[in-house]
Image (cartoon, rainbow, N blue to C red):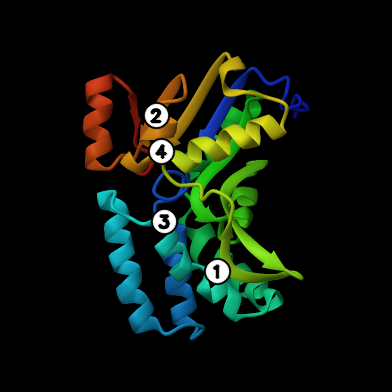
Amino acid sequence: MNAKPPASEARSLALFDLDHTLLPIDSDYEWARFLARIGAIDGQEHSRRNDEYLRQYKSGTLDIFEFLEFQLAPLAAHPREQLDRWHAQYMAEVIRPAIRPSARALVRRHLDAGDLCALVTATNEFVTAPIAAEFEIPHLVATTVESLNGEFTGRPRGTPSYREGKVTRTHEWLQSQGAALARFDMSWFYSDSINDLPLLSEVSHPVATNPDDRLANLAAERGWKVLRLFE
């Protein structure tokens, strides 16, 4: 395989949402279900609130800071070493069995073309970093979790990678790579959700991928490509 050019030299950019885009599941939601299944959290109450936040996300009414206070709490309740062991089990039992060849192939096409590739997701970095590695995506733009002395505090750090925050965090990441969105000849963003409209509107090639109804309708109005990886 040919060596990839440095980020500052890549001529094309490929950004991928994760949940219901590259994965046919929601990794954050399934992480909570996994923790409930192994007895790490109160399954009944957590499931009730998790379902309500998922409904809010789909409707575009989610308060991301309220959600993160809830969703990051288990990370502060357990030692990092234990969390890492649980996450390895979660990858083996939940994530790898869910990954479809079509999603791997999509990422691989961009990697082989020498495009600068990043996973851009609202889900926190602890949950998603191993998933990005599984897809061999070299860069991750995710909600950052605050840590102190190697242990998570349960609080987010900086701007959450959600809605307009995805645009902010993507520009910050590109700047850290010595690049800027405007200088790429072509840029793609693959997403399933109307919540990602701000970043979809920034790239030259927005792709509604396994889109929800609102995004599918908007893609039809604007003539955006629609990709269905899981059919």
Within 10 Å of disc 3 (Cα), the crowding (few <14, some 14-19, many 20+) is some
Q: Secondary structure at mark 4?
A: strand
Q: Secondary structure at mark 1?
A: helix
* Residue at image coords 73%, 19%: 9
Number of the front mark, 3 or 4:
3
Number of the front mark, 3 or 1:
3
The mark nearer the N terminus, 1 or 4, is: 1
Q: Disc 1 residue type? A: Tyr
The mark nearer the N terminus, 3 or 2, is: 3
Within 10 Å of disc 2 (Cα), the crowding (few <14, some 14-19, many 20+) is many
Query: In front: 164, or 98?
Result: 164
Give the residue at mark 3: 64
Q: Disc 4 residue type? A: Ser
Question: From mark 3 to mark 2, how far is it between C-alphas?
Answer: 24 Å
The mark nearer the N terminus, 1 or 2, is: 1
Position of the N terminus by quadrant? top right
Q: Position of residue 93 (x, y in %)?
A: 52, 68
Marker disc for residue 191: 4
How many discs mark residues in the rendered view?
4
Picture layout, residue 35 above or below residue 99: below
Q: Position of residue 166 (x, y in %)?
A: 49, 40
Quadrant of residue 114 in the image?
top right
Quadrant of residue 88 in the image?
bottom right
The mark nearer the N terminus, 3 or 1, is: 3
Q: Secondary structure at mark 3?
A: helix
Give the residue at mark 2: 207
* Circle 1/circle 2 CB separation < 8 Å: no
Marker disc for residue 90: 1
Q: Disc 3 residue type? A: Ile
* Residue at image coords 64%, 31%: 174
Q: Disc 2 residue type? A: Val
